[in-house]
Image (cartoon, helix red, strand yellow):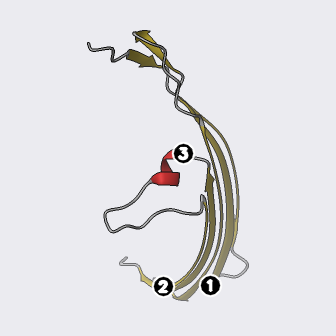
Amino acid sequence: MCGTPTYGAQLKNTSDNFGLGLHGKPTGALEIGADFSYSDIKDEFQQQALVGSPIASLPNVSTKQTRFNLFGKYALQKNSGVRLDYVYDRYSTDDWLWSNWMYADGTQLRDPTQKVNFIGVSYYFKWQ
């Protein structure tokens, strides 16, 4: 074995989640809605040497994600219409792996907190 420790790990992934949605149809042609979700995720590694010298366990990781969606649909006809979406997403982690990770093209993740705003406009058609 050349002094290489054999180790075991008790991996544990737990999360607390919350979500809330509100959808309504103020008129026959207009539908609106909002959705909110929050996740608090924890990863534990709990490594220990089974044979050989003691080892240090990997650090625990904490991740939080918050998402807020707004949408509006307007029916142009019974089977078609337009839709507008807005999404705000916030992702935050203290994952130690990301602090030194480098992609093949040299890109690195520098900020462990990412914020995304998305606006989308679409046309829909339903075959009936």
The residue drawn where x is 37% and y is 16% is 5
Q: Amino acid at mark 2?
A: Ser
Work out whether residue 19 or residue 29 is closer to the camera in this orientation and state it. Answer: 19
Quote the CA–CA distance across marks 3 and 1: 49 Å
Q: Earlier in the sequence, mark 3 or mark 1?
A: 1
Residue 52: x %, y % from top left? 40, 10
Q: Name the secondary structure under disc 1.
A: loop
Q: Are marks 1 and 2 in contact (CB under 8 Å)?
A: no
Residue 83 is left or right of residue 104, and the answer is right
Q: Earlier in the sequence, mark 1 or mark 2?
A: 1
Quote the CA–CA distance across marks 1 and 2: 16 Å
Residue 47 is left or right of residue 33, and the answer is left
Q: Which mark is residue 96?
A: 3
Residue 123: x %, y % from top left? 46, 86
Q: Which mark is residue 122?
A: 2
Q: For mark 1, what is the residue? A: 29
Q: Amino acid at mark 3?
A: Trp
Q: Amino acid at mark 1?
A: Ala
Residue 83, compared with residue 111, is above or below; it is below
The residue drawn where x is 60% and y is 58% is 112
Residue 109: x %, y % from top left? 50, 62
